[in-house]
Image (cartoon, helix red, strand yellow):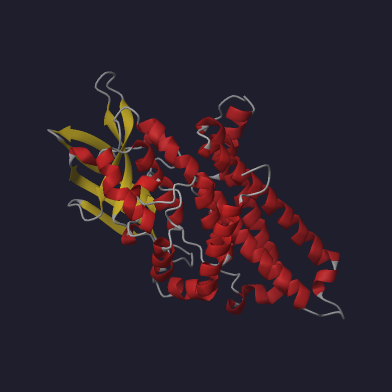
Amino acid sequence: MVGFTESEERQALRQAVSELAGKYGHEYYLEKARAGGKTDELWNEAGSLGYLGVSVPEAYGGGGAGIGDLAAVCEEFCAAGTPMLLMVVSPAICATVIARFGTEEQRRTWLPGFADGSVRMAFGITEPDAGSNSHRITTTAARDGEDWILNGRKVFVSGVDEADAVLIVGRTEDARTGKLKPVLFILPTDTPGFEYKEIPMDLVSADKQFGLFLDDVRLPANALVGSEDAALAQLFAGLNPERILGAAFSVGIARYALDKAAAYANDRNVWGAPIGSHQGISHPLAEVKIETELAKLMGQKAAALYDAGDDHGAGEAANMAKYAAAEAATRTVDQAVQTHGGNGLASEYGLGTLLAAARVGRIAPVSREMVLNFVAQHSLGLPKSY
């Protein structure tokens, strides 16, 4: 990115992804989601065209671009009404962590599949009793000869039913201090002792949520990602892209809703003129347009910092972008529904299901309150509040 203008390559990428997603459209997505199906056709075509692997290193079949390009892909899918939540997890978190910290064997094994979309990987960090407190994670990894034995539980893990493996965050004892430290493992979903159960959700989504159960799961030594002593750095290297993609996801949803609202406000004629000519309609839509554009800019800043290797700077910007985008999406969808009146909740207009979907961004992958804690402490230098 030069100044505030995206490169011609990224603009072309956006256009190509938008055209692909538009070929499927929101009706396709809703039909799959309501029937309990998957967006396999869209995912597979996007993968074959290289859109899912734009940030995978070229040496492993990817596009060799940055996280900013992957975020642009995610945003355009959402803006076309075809949000694929697994994009936030599989190519953004898992592929990034493996590309940056995985062994050469792990890179050769997994990255080509991320590059063409044939591999899908979930990410397991949240636990029933830990929530946002990663220091309370109780999933443990103990050595047994050369192997590792994992025990524990995870909740709200997206897309396990369609994943080849799960990137699991656990804890193991530090031989020097005796204290528990984080470790990451690649856990194939067909491993004995590993089970998952769907969590019923009041969401219309093609991506389901699951609880995971690990009961004496035995993994070989090469399942450990990277260095046992660098897991904390590896974990945060994956969480920044997660927040950047989460922001892009929310921005895309906001754009979709705003496009619908503006078109309706231009076409709907009640008092002898389009309803969009009234400031009671136009001003709220203008407000959320501004908020969405500001959130998008912060997301682009976060991606630029991350791609430049500034993990610390990217952490602050990524959290701010995720916060701003979730707030913008929630307000935009609500205003789009209000603009439509009763039609906003009619299935024909494709907005009602987004009320809950947009709201998720204020909760996951990190709550707005935890983002505020981060900004207060790290950006403003205020005392830690938790």
Task: Tell me the residue at 46%/65% (across/down).
Answer: 205
Q: Horizontal placement of 243 versus 328: left or right?
A: left
Q: Residue furthest right?
A: 272
Task: Tell me the residue at 65%/43% (across/down).
Answer: 2
Report the number of discs.
0
Using the image, determine if residue 150 lies above or below residue 252.
Answer: above
Q: Quadrant of residue 339?
A: bottom right
- Residue 235 appearing in the image: yes
Q: Position of residue 297 (x, y in %)?
A: 65, 46
Task: Tell me the residue at 67%/70% (across/down).
Answer: 260
Using the image, determine if residue 101 lies above or below residue 49.
Answer: above
Q: Position of residue 380 (x, y in %)?
A: 64, 27
Q: Position of residue 94 (x, y in %)?
A: 38, 46
- Residue 366 appearing in the image: no
Q: Horizontal placement of 220 versus 250: left or right?
A: left
Task: Tell me the residue at 39%/31% (across/down).
Answer: 232
Using the image as rendered, state which of residue 42 and residue 261 is in the foreground: 42
Using the image, determine if residue 30 lies above or below residue 7.
Answer: below
Using the image, determine if residue 237 lies above or below residue 360.
Answer: above
Using the image as rendered, state which of residue 170 and residue 310 is in the foreground: 310
Quadrant that contains the N terminus: top right
Q: Residue furthest left?
A: 145
Q: Quadrant of residue 78?
A: bottom right
Q: Position of residue 128 (x, y in %)?
A: 38, 46
Q: Horizontal placement of 258 versus 138: left or right?
A: right
